[in-house]
Amino acid sequence: MVTVLFHGRRVLPLRCRNFLVGHLHHNHLCTFDNLKSQYRPKHVVVSASNTQVPTTALVKMKIGEDDKSWTNLTSFACPICYNPFQNIPNDRSSSAHSASLECNTCKKSYKGNGTYLDLIVTSGSEEYTESVPPSTELFRTPLVSFLYERGWRQNFIIGGFPGPEKEFEMAKDYLKPTFGGTIVDASCGSGLFSRMFSKSKLYKAVVALDFSENMLRQCDEFVKKEGVSTESLILVRADICRLPFASTSVDAVHAGAALHCWPSPSSSVAEISRILRPGGVFVATTFIADGVYSNLPFLSLARQVFHGITKSRIFLSESELEDLCKTCGLVDYSCARNGPFVMISATKPH
C-alpha cells in the first residue's frame, strides 16, 4: 500500500538524529591482522541541525498487507531533470513497487512492475534501445544473476575479500555518522548488503538500486525467502551514472564489489557526490592493483582480458581511487586493504 505526502515548502528542516548508541552496541571496525593502523577509517561528525533539503516528493510508503507501521523512505527525482515527481496514485492497496510517478517538469512518467520501480532514463520507451557495455550486460543475464550468491560472490575471497559479514561490519564503522538516515546500496546486485542493512534497522530507509532487472528479481526472491521486512526497503532500477535522487538528499551510499564494473567510475562517483548531503558518506569495496599486486601475473592478465572484453577499467590503484574521490568533490578519503581487496570511504564536505 502506498501513500505519498507532498510538502509545498521550498526547504524542509531536518531533525537532529538520534543515533541510538545503546542499540548499536558500539560497533567497531572488523579488521584483518595485517591491516596497518594508518588505514583505519576516519570518522566524520555530522551535524544535521542546520541541514536543508530541496523541494522533493517525500514518499511515505507501506509495502505489504501485513505491515503495521509507516516509514518515510526517501526523496526520488526524475533522472532526466532531477526535479521531484508530481503525482502519485491514491490507490493505497497497491505496492510501492507498482506505483506510477510523474515528473512535474518534463512530465515523463515512470512505472513500477510490482517487483521494483523502474527509474532509468529510457523507462517506458517503445522503439528506442540502447547498447550497454558488456560488463553491464553480463550482470543482466538470468544465469549470472542466479549464480551471484550461489558461488560467484563467494569466490571473491581469492582476491582478499573477507566475506560479506566482515565487510558489513567494516562498512558500518565508516557509516556510523549517517545511521538513522537514508542509504542507497548502489549496484546492489541480488541485494546481499541491501538485506543486511534492512535487517540491521540502522537506517530509516534502504534503497536497493541496480541496473539489472534480473538482479532485482533475485533480490526480491531473497527478501521473500528470508522474510526480510520491507517496511523501509525499496527496490529501484536505475543507472549509476544518472541516479534518480534530488541533489543533497541521501545520507549514505554503499557500493559493494561494484566500482570496477562501472562503465565510467568518474561519472558514477560524481553522481554519488551530487546526491549526498553535506557530511554524507560514500563507502565502496573493489579490487585494487598497485605495488606488488600490480605485478602478479594473474591480476595483470585478468586486467588486460577484462578490459579488452568489457572496455571497463578493473583494478584501479589506491592513488587513482583517492584522486577519483577528490576529483568528484569528496574529502577525508580513507581505506583498509587486504591484498587486492580494498574498502574505501570518502565524505561530502560541509
Image (tube, rainbow, N blue to C red):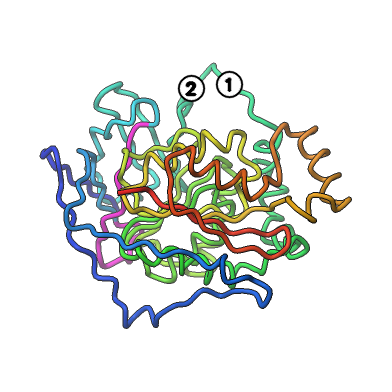
Q: Amino acid at mark 2?
A: Ser
Rendered view: 176 above or below 75: below
Task: State the extent of the magenta-drawn residues as a range.
Answer: 62-78
- State left or right for residue 182 relative to residue 27: left
The correct choice, above or below, for 125 with respect to 8 in the image is above
Residue 83 x %, y %: 28, 31
Q: Position of residue 26 (x, y in %)?
A: 40, 80
* Pick the front one: 49 or 84: 49
Image marks 1 and 2: residues in contact by CB distance under 8 Å = yes
Q: Which residue is mark 1?
A: 129
Q: Residue at x 39, y 35 (%)?
A: 111
Q: Nearer the viewer, residue 170 or 155?
A: 170
Amino acid found under the numbered disc labelled 1: Thr
Residue pictured at 17% horizontal, 42% vertical: 6
The residue under label 2 is: 125
Kindly identify which numbered label has been placed on residue 147: none
Q: Main secondary structure of the magenta part?
A: loop
Residue 164: give x, y in percent of width and height.
61, 67
Mark 1–mark 2 Cα distance, whole angstroms, equals 8 Å
Q: Residue at x 62, y 43 (%)?
A: 320
Seen at 30% across and 45% down, the residue is 249
Residue farthest toward the front in the current orientation of the protein: 38
Q: Which residue is most to the right? A: 297
Q: Nearer the viewer, residue 60 or 41?
A: 41
Q: Is residue 68 magenta?
A: yes
- Count all numbered tags in the image, as a single digit: 2
Mark 2 element type: loop
Quarter occupied by residue 10: top left
